[in-house]
Each structure stands twice: as C-alpha cells, then as structure tokens.
Image (tube, rainbow, N blue to C red):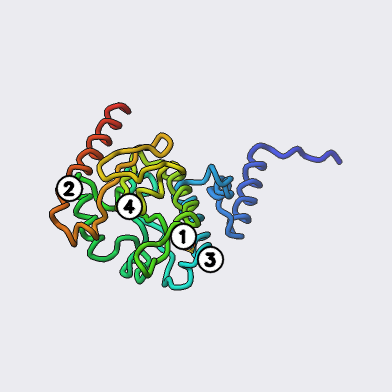
Amino acid sequence: MPTQQPTLGDCIESLRLHIRSLQRTGLRFDMINRCPAPADQASRPARLAALREKSTDCTGCRLCRERTSVVFGEGNADARLMFVGGAPDNASDAQGRPFAGPSGELLTRIIGAINLRRDQVYVTTAVKCLAPQGDPGKESVEACLPFLHRQIEIIQPEIICTLGPVAARALQEPGSPDAPLRGNMYRMGTIPVMPTHHPELLLRRPELKNETWIDVQVIQRELGSHTQRKQ
Ligand code: SF4
C-alpha cells in the first residue's frame, strides 16, 4: 500500500507538538541565544561579575590575612567616569563596598557637584583589601593591579579620577620618575587620568576642597568635550 505523504498542515502540527514536549522539559527557545559567550563577547556586567568572583578568595598578598571582605568595586559597568581610591577603609571592609563611610559620603557629594550620580560612575580602589596601617605598600599594589587593569579594560572609561597618591601612582607608567601631582592630568595609554585629593584628606583639611573642585571641573569639561566629539 502506498504511504501517504504528510501535508504541510501535518508537518506544522507535528512541529507544534514537538515544541510543546520540549517546553514541558523546561527548555525555552529564547535560551538558544544564551549559550555562554566567549569571555570577550560577554556583557560588561557579566565580565565584571566574573572578575569579582575571581577576586573573592584572592590570597595574592599579605592583606588577605586581615580583611573582612574583598572590596571589588561598584557602579555602572558602562561608566564614562571611573574613580579609583587607594585601599578600602574600615567601613568599606565591613560593608564590602568602596567608599562606604564618611569619606564615601563626601565622594558622593563631589560626584553630585559635576551633575552626576554615584550609580552613573564606577568606584573602586587600587588594592581591594583593607590595609590596616593605612598605606597598602608597593608589593600589595603591584599584586592587586591586574584586577584594576582588567576593570579598566572592561569598563573602558573616558576618564579616570584617582583619589589620593596611592591610586595616582598605581596607574602611572612603570618607571615614571616623578609621582603624579594633584591637578596634573596624565595618561594611562589613551585614557586621561586626573589625580585629585582623597576625600579622607578633605575631611581632615577642608581648605583643600577648592583644589578638588577645580580638578573635577576639568573632568566635567573633558567629559563634555568627549560628548561633543561623539555628536
Ligand atoms: Fe588579593 Fe588584592 Fe586582596 Fe592582595 S589586596 S589579597 S592581591 S585582592
């Protein structure tokens, strides 16, 4: 007996039943495009999350011994402006967030002074663990720098503002003879870096706030000129 050829309608119905049975297994068809992308094609938040994960149990330097948490950084993964401090303070160590204490409140006000919100920028530190004596030391900065470099590579900010001398030195070209001075912009590759005072210093010496105000105005102008160039 000759077998009857299925009609187009039969094929559609059979496909529909097949899809239903797959759906009952939990498979969703929008998952097809969600196979893990190669690292460089993943989204910025995903790449930052993977890097954060890698940092959580880091024992790359002596600072791992006394930390409560690795303070990786937070903010907008697409930020145009990135702030980099030296090392987390006690409040940050306790909360696992950079600039969490009074110096963080001042930083939030500084960011607001150039018409940005903290969730529009990215905030991190040169070393990710509490430095109990204040200065993390050259060895810890060097050990931790790959995390910061990778954060910068992922976020690709248009400008970086370093807060205090530890961060300013950390992003300098290796072998540079002089430490960067506050207010003197330099470059890390193609990215302009503006060093300014650490908010903690500003809390102790409010008379220096005016200098930081001048520095962040330069940053604001730089961001404005980038926007104009993009238009
Ligand atoms: Fe690792 Fe950086 Fe913490 Fe040192 S400071 S233990 S290198 S995360």
Question: Residue 200, position in %: x, y?
Answer: 24, 60
Graded by Cα atoms within 10 Å as few (under 14), some (14 to 19) or many (20 or more), the crowding at tag 2 reads: some
Q: Quadrant of residue 188?
A: top left
Q: Earlier in the sequence, mark 3 or mark 2?
A: 3
Please tell me whether mark 3 or mark 2 is closer to you in this view. 3
Question: Residue 44, position in %: x, y?
Answer: 45, 47
> For the residue marked with disc 1, what is the amino acid?
Ser
Mark 2–mark 4 Cα distance, whole angstroms, equals: 22 Å
Q: Quadrant of the C terminus?
A: top left
Residue denoted by label 2: 113
Question: Residue 121, position in %: x, y?
Answer: 31, 48
Residue denoted by label 3: 59
Residue 165 is labelled as 4
Mark 3–mark 2 Cα distance, whole angstroms, equals: 38 Å
Q: Earlier in the sequence, mark 4 or mark 3?
A: 3
- The front one of 211 and 9 is 211
Mark 4–mark 1 Cα distance, whole angstroms, equals: 15 Å
Disc 4 on helix, strand or loop? helix
Looking at the image, residue 132 sits to the left or right of residue 114; the answer is right
Q: Are marks 1 and 2 in contact (CB under 8 Å)?
A: no
> For the residue marked with disc 4, what is the amino acid?
Pro
Residue at image point 25% right, 42% down? 183
